Image: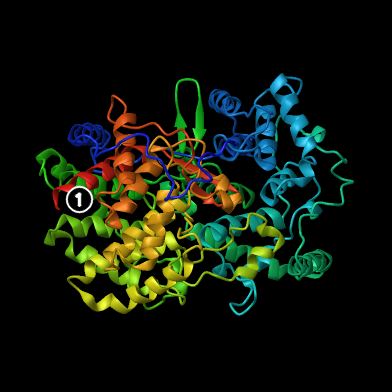
């Protein structure tokens, strides 16, 4: 991958684009605002496509064959999408322009073969050769190997031992379902049923992929060669011991554990939004329901399938499946952009749109519903928002901060109670180190990332800088009126200072990457009253300036998650990253610096006729290093927000 500007610093950067402040951005703001308003749903919300790599659409095809519920028309459209995503070397990457990923390529190959592609087709030959060069299907990650075991392509000894009896472990045990992240537990609980009973896919066309193995699958002995750490190897020994002792387990214990696992995920099925409102958990639950004998005409089973199908994006000739949907997040950020654009204009149409959005958001706030977060905070009153349309067990701290901040900026007593409940909930969700995770407090049992099941390294939901910064952005702004959370803010600021990288940036867990993390923290610091001449702020501003590209913009690729030395850099500028950098520098009161002027000029020059911008790259991780996302709304509302903030900052001086 070509990386530019890696040697430039703030001192020697040459501004080749804008020698002075750019033209008044009013016209660009009006055009972007009009475009965004035109995409609002009549109910009040915004929701944009949330695209992942080929793993999810491939798994949709695999699910259809697992269940023998094959829609050939839909399958053909998904296959068209998969073929369109292939890399030049025949592999399939985790994000556009990225290197090929073995597990993604294996699943895509298998799905295409199920859809009818001949193994002798040119694209299949190329993909197969690439897979074999990487060591073959035996080297796939755990989730892929579990799928292969269920399709009888590898023996069950090739996957970790995931007995359903994990549901009976006491809370003091080193592993407990409450000690892992929400996405891990919603995936793992129904999966434990499928793995315990070694459930077989129906696979009606009997499609096999023996050609993807260097050593025949039943002869392969190195399925766990990736386990390197002493703790990981010790756990692997226990894994094998568990398999040996499994036949001695009394039947009533297994039945009790199965019943508990079933009750757990059935209670969280979440209607038409699905278990955890995430694709993989929904599919595992649907397949487990089938194994447990819940008939096809059962209402809950039908709703569970409908929830999966709601994630599909179907077009004329192609289709893909989203990992989840993001209406709360999209709506909250869209409102913030429009509020910034309207802070001086008072446009009646835009005001009506934001009020409609905030009313819709208010209707989605959670309160006294059951939630897994209550395990750590049993006496805390609810008040959060989820990420999706509905996900009552799993409110999202980050979304809650954004939505409550938008309500606070609306400056109306209508939402006073919503804001108070949200702020109190966020304050109560603070972890012991002062930071915030996305869904749980103190979800930081790091040793669990070394168990064989966790080769994706994302079993946990520990505090992160970006989420923490959003929390103090809300609490800091609210502190001007209600200072009861000052101690919480101070602890969080101390956490963020400790998390700052040596070069002045902050890591971005939920957005790509250090530019996103630095933007998050600088906005949070400004709201919390941290002065612009603070050492941490100055270091961050200097770092941002040093990463500006020759065209005036900023860009950052996901390769930085794999190699932190390439942080804040990319082969091109993006509207998303340029908008973040401009807002971050404005938060540091860099109103007149040439870097901000050049960044604004970049946005003005790259706006399209419809008022939007076009970023092709993926802009966020689901799990850093293993799973990436493209939020299709980011190049629509973030540039608008940045241009409006720039205009308003200059007008206020």
The answer to whether residue 565 is above or below residue 634 is below
Q: Residue furthest front?
A: 12
Say left or right for 358 vs 58: left
Looking at the picture, tell me which residue is in the foreground, 302 or 13: 13
The quadrant holding residue 524 is bottom left
Q: Write down the residue under mark 1.
A: 649
Classify residue 525 as left or right of residue 123: left
Vertical relation: 126 (above or below) 354: above
Give 356 or 631, whichever is nearer the viewer: 631
Q: Percent from the top left, x then y, of residue 483?
A: 22, 76
User: Can you see residue 291?
Assistant: yes
Residue at point 59%, 61% (across, down): 459
Residue 76 against residue 145 in the figure, above or below = above
Q: Name the residue at the right extreme.
A: 219
Identify the residue shown where x is 20% and y is 66%.
417
Where is 390 relative to 36, above or below? below
Task: Give coordinates of residue 510: x percent, y percent.
Answer: 46, 53
Q: Residues within 10 Å of mark 1 (few under 14, many from 20)?
A: some
Choose top left, top right, bottom left or bottom right for residue 460: bottom right
Quadrant of the rendering where the N terminus is positioned? top right
Label 1: state its secondary structure: helix
Q: Position of residue 245 (x, y in %)?
A: 82, 69
């Amino acid at each position: 991958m070509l990386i530019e500007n890696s040697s430039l610093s703030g001192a020697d950067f040459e501004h080749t684009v804008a020698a002075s402040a750019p033209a008044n951005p009013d016209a660009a703001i009006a055009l972007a605002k009009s475009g965004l308003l035109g995409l609002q749903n009549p109910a009040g919300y915004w929701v944009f496509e949330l695209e992942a790599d080929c793993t999810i659409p491939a798994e949709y095809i695999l699910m259809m064959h697992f269940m023998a519920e094959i829609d050939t028309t839909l399958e053909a459209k998904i296959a068209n999408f998969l073929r369109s995503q292939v890399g030049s070397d025949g592999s399939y990457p985790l994000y556009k322009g990225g290197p090929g990923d073995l597990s993604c390529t294996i699943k895509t190959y298998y799905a295409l073969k199920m859809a009818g592609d001949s193994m002798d087709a040119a694209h299949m030959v190329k993909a197969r050769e690439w897979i074999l060069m990487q060591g073959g299907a035996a080297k796939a990650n755990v989730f892929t190997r579990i799928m292969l075991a269920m399709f009888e392509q590898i023996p069950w000894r090739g996957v970790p031992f995931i007995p359903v009896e994990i549901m009976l472990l006491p809370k003091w045990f080193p592993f407990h379902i409450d000690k892992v992240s929400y996405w891990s537990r919603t995936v793992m609980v129904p999966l434990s049923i499928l793995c315990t009973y070694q459930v077989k896919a129906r696979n009606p066309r009997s499609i096999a992929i023996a050609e993807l193995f260097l050593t025949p699958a039943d002869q392969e002995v190195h399925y766990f060669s990736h386990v390197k750490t002493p703790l990981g190897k010790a756990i692997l020994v226990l894994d094998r011991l568990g398999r040996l002792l499994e036949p001695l387990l009394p039947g009533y214990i297994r039945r009790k554990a199965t019943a508990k696992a079933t009750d757990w995920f059935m209670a969280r099925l979440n209607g038409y939004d699905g278990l955890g409102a995430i694709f993989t958990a929904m599919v595992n639950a649907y397949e487990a329901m089938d194994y447990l004998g819940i008939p096809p005409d059962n209402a809950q089973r039908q709703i569970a399938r409908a929830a999966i199908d709601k994630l599909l994006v179907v077009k004329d000739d192609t289709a893909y499946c989203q990992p989840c949907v993001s209406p709360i997040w999209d709506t909250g950020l869209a409102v913030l952009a429009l509020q910034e654009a309207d802070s001086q204009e008072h446009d009646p149409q835009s005001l009506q749109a934001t009020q409609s959005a905030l009313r819709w958001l208010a209707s989605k706030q959670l309160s006294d519903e059951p939630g897994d977060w209550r395990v750590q905070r049993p006496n805390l009153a609810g008040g959060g928002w989820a990420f999706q349309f509905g996900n009552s067990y799993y409110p999202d701290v980050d979304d809650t901060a954004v939505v409550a901040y938008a309500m606070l900026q609306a400056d109306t007593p209508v939402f006073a109670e919503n804001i108070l409940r949200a702020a109190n909930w966020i304050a109560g969700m603070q972890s012991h180190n002062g930071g915030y995770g996305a869904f749980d407090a103190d979800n930081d049992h790091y040793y669990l990332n070394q168990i064989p099941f966790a080769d994706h390294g994302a079993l946990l939901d520990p505090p992160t800088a970006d989420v923490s910064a959003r929390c103090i952005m809300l609490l800091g702004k609210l502190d001007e009126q209600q200072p009861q959370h000052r101690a919480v803010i101070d602890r969080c600021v101390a956490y963020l200072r400790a998390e700052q990288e040596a070069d002045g940036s902050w890591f971005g867990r939920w957005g790509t990457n250090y530019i996103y993390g630095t933007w998050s923290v600088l906005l949070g610091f400004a709201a919390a009253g941290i002065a612009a001449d603070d050492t941490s702020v100055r270091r961050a501003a200097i770092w941002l300036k040093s990463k500006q590209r020759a065209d005036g913009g900023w860009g950052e690729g996901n390769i930085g998650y794999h190699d932190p030395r390439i942080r804040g850099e990319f082969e091109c500028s993006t509207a998303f990253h340029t908008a973040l950098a401009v807002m971050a520098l404005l938060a540091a009161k860099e109103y007149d610096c040439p870097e901000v002027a050049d960044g604004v000029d970049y946005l003005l020059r790259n706006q399209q006729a419809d008022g939007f911008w076009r970023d092709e790259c993926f802009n966020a991780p689901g799990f850093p290093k293993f799973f990436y996302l493209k939020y299709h709304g980011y190049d629509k509302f973030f540039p608008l927000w940045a241009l409006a903030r720039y205009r308003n900052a200059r007008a206020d001086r």
